Image: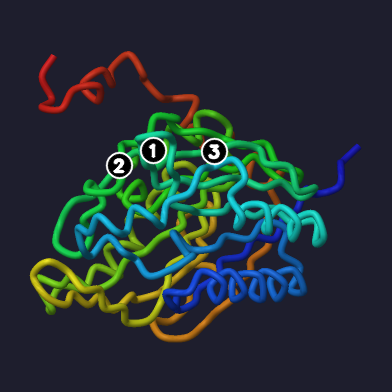
Amino acid sequence: MEEAARKVVVAALQFACSDSVSENVDTAERLVRIAHKKGANIILIQELFEGYYFCQAQRADYFRRAKPYKGHPTIIRMQQLAKELGVVIPVSFFEEANNAHYNSIAIIDADGTDLGLYRKSHIPDGPGYQEKFYFNPGDTGFKVFTTKFAKIGVAICWDQWFPEAARAMALQGAEILLYPTAIGSEPQDEGLDSREHWKRVMQGHAGANLVPLVASNRIGKETIKTEHGDSTISFYGNSFIAGPTGELVALANDKDEEVLVAEFDLDYIKTQRHSWGIFRDRRPDLYKLLLTLDGTK
């Protein structure tokens, strides 16, 4: 006897941030409610959505933006919202843990339960994206969270460029991959536009692992005062949802607030994934070079 299909609706939010925590959290809640009305079960908000992307500058005063994980007011508010609507909400935030700091995300289940924390593993350091000044490398490892609707793997922004991270989550049973993001122009090179590269890399993760993937990015122009003068990034949005062969199912533009939604049949995709043979035919015994930096034994 055939069982009923196990379908889930995912959503990606996209909006411009001000530098007011209350305004941004209000915007996030408003869009979560819109996503819920569209039928979404799992709703992804963009990276560090409480304010401007402050990593354009190395400023000591910006450490005051960090808060401890436990008792974090935005996480608590999103727990209440998740419970009210019956939806899953990963919540990105700047974490203070004693003298350490992390770019972190708390996974809130549909009953408001906090399922745990992931800390960003890959920390970028380049013009406009000087995250190493603020964040310790994450120490949680790649994790999969069992929510009411699906097993989800959640990683953060720069993590999305590393196929090892996506595969690690898929090996642990992730049925959907989610990547909250803050990416846009490159202050040192106005002609460099990474949006298509950015999308294709994650579409490849979806296709290589035969799982849907959700990416949420911000929009808008943000200017931060740095030690060398003003630095400006124009965030290019292009939030998207990809299907299990890497196909684009929903795509936002680079300037408008958006709530993208898509439905997936997880049991059907599971059958696809198993029958394609990529996990059957893996050879972990041959992959030891992946544990090195320079490719030598």
Q: Give how far across and how far down residue 221 sits, in percent.
A: 32, 82
- Residue 187: x and y in percent read 15, 72
* CB contact under 8 Å: marks 1 and 2: yes
Front-lying residue, 30 or 191: 30
Q: Is mark 1 on a helix, strand or loop?
A: helix
Q: What amino acid is at disc 2?
A: His
85 is higher (above) or lower (below) than 150: below
Q: Is residue 221 left or right of residue 208?
A: left
Mark 3 packing: few (<14 Cα in 10 Å), some, or many (20+)? some
Residue found 37% across the figure and 41% down from its top: 101
Residue under the point 42% across and 72% down: 218
Question: What distance separates the C-alpha of mark 2 from that of mark 3?
Answer: 16 Å
**Res. 117 mark:** 3
| Amino acid identity at mark 1 | Ala
Viewer-nearest of discs 1 and 2: 2
Write down the residue under mark 2: 122
Q: Counting residues from the N terminus, which is met first, the one under dot 1 or under dot 2? A: 2
Q: Position of residue 287 (x, y in %)?
A: 28, 21
Q: Mark 1 points at which residue?
A: 165
